[in-house]
Image (spheres, helix red, strand yellow):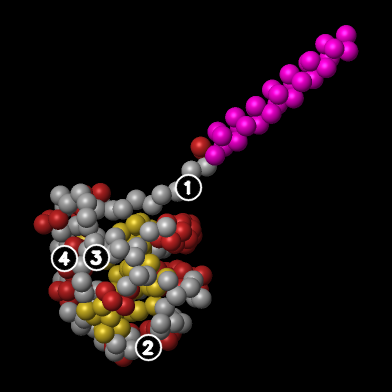
Amino acid sequence: MKNFFYKYKIFLTLFLFISVIIFLLFYDALKQEKILPIYSPSMVNYELVDSKIQHVKKYHKIAKFSLTNQNGKTITNNTFSNKIYVADFFFTTCPTICPIMTDNMRLIQNEFINDPDILLLSHSVTPNIDSVPTLKKYAIEKKVIDNKWHLVTGSKNEIYKLARESYLAVKSRGDNKEHGMIHTENFVLIDKQRRIRGFYDGTNIDSVNDLINDILILKQEQLKI
């Protein structure tokens, strides 16, 4: 009888051990690391994409640019070389979604305030109104940190082209005669290779928190490259 219980005990121990191993394997399989997509124009709402590139399915990157920030400094792709950054489109006199977007962009700024690998870039969609002094005044009011967050102005055509052909973040000029382009609430996450890795609702705090988490995921991914 003792022999029987001893064998039974061994069987239970082995069964329990194997069950734990199987559980851990299943848990590990389910707990896969999140991989951020690489967006191409064909994956984005066609209203936000210039008709010339709506068919593009891969190899999409942010084009070269040269704009001026709130301090009168020229900002180019080189400013963001080997950086992860978040881009959006706004204007300083916007009374609706822009103040919310700016507040949420500041949350991201403060979250990564000590991380030199993360930058922010806000493009004015009314560059004829948002001069350097206007942007500087706005930056001071909104507690923008100059070396972390660039508010930029420049050629209206260049900004519109960037918005439609690079960041895929504004609607066509349409009937918007005052501003020339209809910007969205989108925050756009850009990796170190100048590729779009995510779109987020800049007016929604849950979406902004998702963006913050995705920046951390992207940082880990980029370390492996």
Identify the disc placed on residue 137: 2
Spatial CA distance of label 3 from label 2 is 28 Å
Residue type at mark 1: give it. Answer: Glu
Q: Is residue 127 shown left or right of residue 109?
A: left
Q: Quadrant of the C terminus?
A: bottom left
Image quarter in which the N terminus is found? top right
User: Furthest residue to the right?
Assistant: 2
Q: Residues within 10 Å of mark 1 (few under 14, many from 20)?
A: few
Q: Of marks 1 and 3, which one's residue comes earlier in the chain?
A: 1
Residue occupying image coordinates x 31% and y 78%: 79
- The part of the chain drawn in magenta is 1-28
Tag 1's secondary structure?
loop
Q: Nearer the viewer, residue 181 or 209?
A: 209
Contact between marks 3 and 2 (CB within 8 A): the answer is: no
- Under mark 4, the amino acid is Arg
Answer with mark 2 or mark 1, whichever residue precedes in sequence. 1
Label at residue 33: 1
